[in-house]
Image (spheres, rainbow, N blue to C red):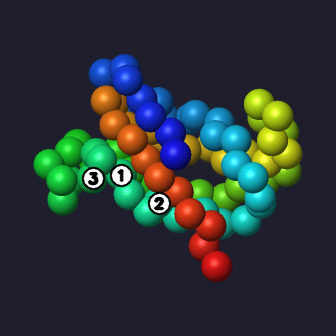
């Protein structure tokens, strides 16, 4: 999960994740179906790139004043 309290979207945010693989967006508060502007991800690829104490990370878009939740695509 990532939260952006800023009114500016974070287009290339490096999000630490616990395992590598393909992750999918489970929920995005900025999706157009919720009345948002549509800053979404659909799928992201997590790779072995250490970040903030975790061994893996992915580059994601975090919407302005929004929250995104990801889950591992199994």
Judge whether 55 appears above or below 10 on screen. Answer: below
For marks 3 and 2, give the CA distance: 11 Å
Residue 48: assigned label: none
Sort mark 3 into few (<14), some (14-19) or many (20+) by Cα contacts within 10 Å.
Answer: some
Q: As displayed, is residue 8 above or below residue 22?
A: above
Query: In the image, residue 70 lies at what x, y percent?
Result: 53, 57
Residue 38 to residue 65: above or below: below
**Under tag 1, what secondary structure?**
strand
Image position of 35 with respect to 73: above or below? above
- Furthest residue in direction bottom, as rendered: 74
| Residue at mark 1 to residue at mark 2: CA–CA distance | 7 Å
Q: Residue at x 33, y 31 (%)?
A: 64
Q: State the image coordinates of residue 20 (x, y, percent, origin top left).
A: 77, 60
- Residue 3 as seen in the image, left or right of residue 55: left
Which image quadrant is residue 15 in? top right
Q: Are marks 1 and 2 in contact (CB under 8 Å)?
A: yes
Mark 2 sits on what residue? 25
Judging from the image, what secondary structure is the residue with disc 3 in? loop
> Taking 41 as reference, is 50 left or right?
right
The location of residue 14, given as percent across then percent down, is: 65, 36
| Residue at the image position 47 percent from the left and 60 percent from the top | 25
Q: CA distance from mark 3 to mark 1?
A: 6 Å
Query: Residue at 79% across / 48% down in the picture?
Result: 56
**Label 2 element class:** strand
**Residue 31, numbered circle:** 3
Q: Which residue is mark 1?
A: 28
Considering depth in this image, is 5 or 58 the residue closer to the camera? 5
């Amino acid at each position: 999960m990532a939260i952006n309290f800023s009114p500016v979207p974070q287009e290339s945010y490096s999000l630490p994740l616990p395992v590598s693989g393909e992750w999918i967006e489970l929920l995005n508060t900025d999706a157009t179906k919720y009345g948002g502007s549509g800053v979404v991800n659909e799928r992201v690829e997590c790779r072995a790139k250490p970040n903030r104490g975790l061994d893996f990370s992915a580059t994601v878009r975090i919407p302005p004043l929004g929250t995104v939740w990801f889950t591992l695509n199994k």
